[in-house]
Amino acid sequence: MRKMSALLYPLISLGLVLLVWHLSVRIFSIPDYLLPAPDAVFAALSQGFADGSLWPHIATTLSEIAVGYLAGSVLAVALGIALAESKTFERFVYPLLVALQAMPKVALGPIILVWCGFGMASKIVLVTLVCFFPLFVNTVNGICRTDKELLDTCRAFSASRLYLLLHVKLPSAAGDIFSGLQIGVSLALIGAVVAEFLSAQSGLGYLIASSSVNMSLSTMFAGVFLLAIIGVCTTQLVRSVKRKMVFWENGDR
């Protein structure tokens, strides 16, 4: 029943939004070139799925997100552990990482295109950069907030530094790491779409940009709708994994 309720409430909210959208278009006679009705958007979705034109765009965007998100997450956790465990590494590397984060990723896009080309590699690099920093910061903060008394107790029993990292610090930081993963998966979607806006031959971002040239708002809204679905599904997937792996933080919820 709890799972059914968790699914039912968002569906009710979505239904209300669609109803208000539909009534607003009809009552105020808003033209299709400004705001298409929901049925026109769903018709564009149905046609795109039926003729197979949407599937390559979805596959491209999902591939960019998956590879870039995985690369950014692995790199963020690895560098976060290294920085939290080594003061020397922190002094040398942390200012450079902060400077990299301060650079607008959209401004780096043309440079990445020159270096990596116009294929999928440039999109993956941009996604990696976008989703890297939130997880990196959460990893560092989570490890640094490990209970000092617990660490001292383990050291009193001659626990090695590697044992402390694997069995004390990382489990303690797991909640923060998964919070960074949830933020990163949303940013990965944004990074993929921005990269496709800059230069692409396929992808949902490319579909939206190319549809704007033809003023096909129903197709543009269909692309945005698919991006929203991907964002919700990926976020819920990360949350589900967190509930399974960091079960001690679930409480009574």
Image: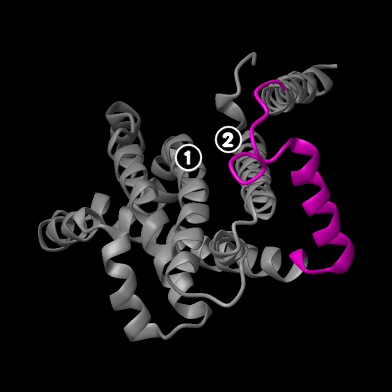
Range drawn in magenta: 27-54
Q: Residue furthest top?
A: 252
**Left or right: where does residue 52 sit relative to residue 210?**
right
Q: Nearer the viewer, residue 104 or 36?
A: 36
Q: Nearer the viewer, residue 140 or 44?
A: 44
Disc 2 to disc 1: CB gap under 8 Å: yes
The location of residue 166, given as percent across then percent down, is: 45, 50
Indicate whether 117 appears above or below 190.
below
Give the mark nearest the N terminus, 2 or 1: 1
Quadrant location, the C terminus = top right
Q: Report whether residue 71 is seen.
A: no
Amino acid of disc 1? Ala
Residue at position x 67%, y 23% in the image: 24
Question: For mark 2, what is the residue?
Answer: 246
Q: Nearer the viewer, residue 232 or 137?
A: 232
Residue at position x 60%, y 63% in the image: 214
